[in-house]
Amino acid sequence: ELRGPGLLDLFTEADEDKSGNLSVEELLAVLQRSGFFPQNKEVAETLMEVIPGAKNHQNMEGKLLMDRVSISLSYFKVVGPLLQERSECQRLQMELQIAEELNLDAEERKLWQDSLLDLWEAFHRFSDDRLEVDRLPLVLMDTELLPKHGSLRSFLCSMAEAELAKSERSKVDRLDLRQCLKILGKIREKECQRVIDVFNHNDSDSTNGLSLEECQKCLEDCGIKAKKEEAEFITCLIDEYDLDESGELELEEFLQMVKFVTSRLRRRRLRQQADLALEYGWGAEEFDFMRLNFMLADKEMDGNLRDDEIAWSVSQLRAEWPPEDTKLILREMGLVTWNSSISVDLAGFLKVMNYVDIRLKHRRIGSLLGLEKEAVDNFCSVWWSMKPQNDMVSISTLVEVIKQLPGYPKKLSKLQEVINEGAERINFQKYCMVMRRSYEQRREENQAADGANP
């Protein structure tokens, strides 16, 4: 894509501030859109190699301050493809090294094309030197070629136990990388056969070739369903794989393309999820822990959590959160109604966790103000209806909402004190102080009424 005629369009689209230059962040967004994720070290070295004066933006330790580097179109034409090539070259070198260390034969290397490094990274993500048997499904979920129908957990565990029984070390109860690859290789062979079956089914005229449009449909038939924002990304990947520009892929090419697309799509989603976690204020370590928890809760191994799985996972991550409140939160977020079930992917789950963290913070604020949990939750429902930004809302928005509530004149008089301070926005604490008076008065009136009518 970075060498095609649409290069100028990519640059123009990425140049959000229309300055005629890209920031490093905007450059990386273009690369990631094409499925390439270079390391910061690679980016820094390439920028200093290509752009004159970039070396002047190094700190005392010799590290490039990349937020100070701008990239014109002429340098973009060089830096973009160069980073793409180097990123792919480094990946291929690492896969070659792993294959040699594991002594893989030609068939095994072909089987794990474009995913061998994914397997190595997943194995070490969930283990040190050896993998516990109950973590094997997690490695599969991070390397699978096609989505699964139903859980394979018990099947994988039985395969792992059988493999361990063959080990010369009788007391070993954890898998090494070679054993892990051997077990998952059997799953991958079945996945490849499924891809072949889909190809043959769609090759109705038996020409042993599918058009690029037909390839897109075949991916869907394989269960690889793109989200709306991913459709263009997948189309670009398919076009990139048509090396001879014939507009058609044969069976072997199609099988390789599926491996290629799956690997790139998985890496893209993982990067987006990590970025979303960072946006919510969680670092890499906390994101990894949340993702691990999500995968452990995903009993169906389909990348989604249901109601009970969400409640379990939230309670594992936030011990102070009452499990019975999870459904309340899901209703407030509009994810579930009283009689419906829910299914959320990891991005959706991160959104739920962010909502939970904000609610816990609001409850702590309410507690310091002497408010009961029920009152805080009621205030929160109104607060979220105003779509707060950075946990603040504008005074004008709050005024319009308050006018729709019972007893609004008293609330507005309290709010006037905040307006008199010259504030244009209000945080949750001051919002609670505005709402508290009428709430307490209403509670006292209800108690008095209950006392008068025993």
Image (cartoon, grey):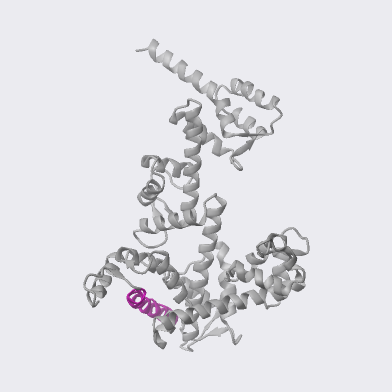
What residue span does the magenta drawing correspond to?
177-199
Residue at 66 percent across and 77 percent down: it is 82
Which one is in front, 95 or 345? 95
Residue at 65 percent across and 26 percent down: it is 418
| Coordinates of residue 284 in the picture (x, y in percent) | 51, 57
Which one is in front, 246 or 352? 352
Residue 239 shown left or right of residue 160 in the figure:
right
Magenta residue check for 164: no
Q: Magenta residues: mostly which secondary structure?
A: helix
Relative to 238, say whether 397 is above or below.
above
Residue 18 shown left or right of residue 103 in the figure:
right
| Coordinates of residue 109 in the picture (x, y in percent) | 43, 83
Residue 331 shown left or right of residue 72 in the figure:
left
Relative to 424, say whether 389 is above or below.
below
Residue 427 shown left or right of residue 117 in the figure:
right
How many callouts does the rendering have? 0
| Coordinates of residue 261 in the picture (x, y in percent) | 51, 74
Magenta residue check for 196: yes
Residue at 29 percent across and 68 percent down: it is 174
Relative to 325, say whether 101 is above or below.
below
Is residue 71 in view from this perspective?
no
Is residue 347 in view from this perspective?
yes
Quadrant in the rendering for residue 289: bottom left
Which one is in front, 290 or 336? 290
